[in-house]
């Protein structure tokens, strides 16, 4: 594939903006927003420095996650348009010759390995926070809240909360990875463009420099090629 970072695109763009994913995003956003409001209410009613110091980081983290989920909905049209436009104007990695193609593949392979390791770390982090690995009442304020406000029914929101934890972590990094995907794709395109400019007159290397200077056909061809490269550069900047 010409898309060296297709796995990132599949995970965070194709699947991230699938209709079922968007539906889950809205459902989980509503649920966790309600839980977050309960947490604020609980902290206000049971405020003490120890509770605040223990739970403030968790509150900040989930506020960030909820913000990114809202942003994902709000910025959907712009994000989809931006990435689709980039994919439309992108040149094939074959377009600048086998040497550049191999260089791009080599660099992208290294970048992809780093990204996969980072994603594995995120998944691992979400997994070890699950209740099956120990008591989480000191980590998540929702646990005492569910017990206090829902009583015997507390297991229902409790299970729903922790079953959605991986999706919440996914939502937290989705926009960042989409931005990273665009940056990496543009870098590849800039590399291809630079190589095109370097090779712009390579098929005229055997022509004498003085002949090039006064050769109308050569001048017109260079003008056309330069316009083509400049147009691509302007398109990428947009």
Image (cartoon, helix red, strand yellow):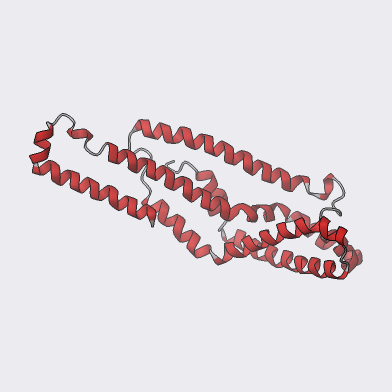
Q: Residue furthest front?
A: 49
Q: Residue furthest top?
A: 206
| Residue at image point 47% right, 41% down | 4
Q: Position of residue 190 (x, y in %)?
A: 38, 44
Say whether residue 60 is left or right of residue 95: right
Q: Position of residue 124 (x, y in %)?
A: 71, 43
Say whether residue 163 is left or right of residue 23: right
Picture quadrant of residue 222: top left
* Numbered-mark total: 0
Picture quadrant of residue 33: bottom right
Screen quadrant of the N terminus = top left
Q: Position of residue 101 (x, y in %)?
A: 39, 34
| Residue at image point 78% right, 48% down | 129
| Residue at image point 43% right, 36% down | 104
Screen quadrant of the C terminus = bottom left
Q: Position of residue 166 (x, y in %)?
A: 70, 51
Q: Is residue 22 above or below residue 208?
A: below
Q: Is residue 56 above or below residue 105?
A: below
């Amino acid at each position: 594939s010409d898309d060296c970072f297709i796995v990132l695109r599949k995970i965070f763009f194709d699947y991230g903006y699938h209709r079922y994913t968007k539906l889950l995003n809205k459902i989980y956003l509503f649920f966790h927003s309600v839980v977050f409001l309960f947490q604020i209410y609980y902290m206000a009613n049971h405020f003490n420095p120890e509770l605040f110091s223990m739970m403030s980081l968790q509150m900040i983290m989930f506020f960030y996650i909820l913000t990114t989920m809202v942003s994902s909905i709000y910025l959907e049209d712009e994000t989809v348009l931006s990435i689709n436009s980039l994919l439309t104007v992108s040149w094939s990695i074959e377009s600048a010759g086998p040497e550049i193609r191999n260089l791009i593949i080599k660099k992208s392979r290294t970048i992809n390995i780093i990204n996969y390791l980072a994603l594995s770390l995120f998944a691992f982090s979400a997994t070890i926070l699950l209740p099956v690995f120990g008591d989480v009442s000191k980590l998540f304020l929702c646990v005492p809240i569910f017990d206090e406000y829902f009583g015997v029914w507390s297991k229902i929101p409790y299970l729903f909360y922790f079953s959605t934890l991986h999706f919440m972590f996914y939502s937290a990094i989705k926009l960042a990875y989409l931005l990273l995907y665009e940056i990496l794709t543009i870098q590849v395109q800039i590399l291809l463009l630079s190589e095109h400019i370097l090779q712009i007159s390579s098929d005229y290397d055997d022509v004498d420099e003085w002949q090039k200077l006064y050769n109308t056909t050569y001048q017109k061809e260079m003008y056309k090629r330069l316009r083509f490269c400049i147009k691509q550069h302007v398109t990428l900047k947009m």
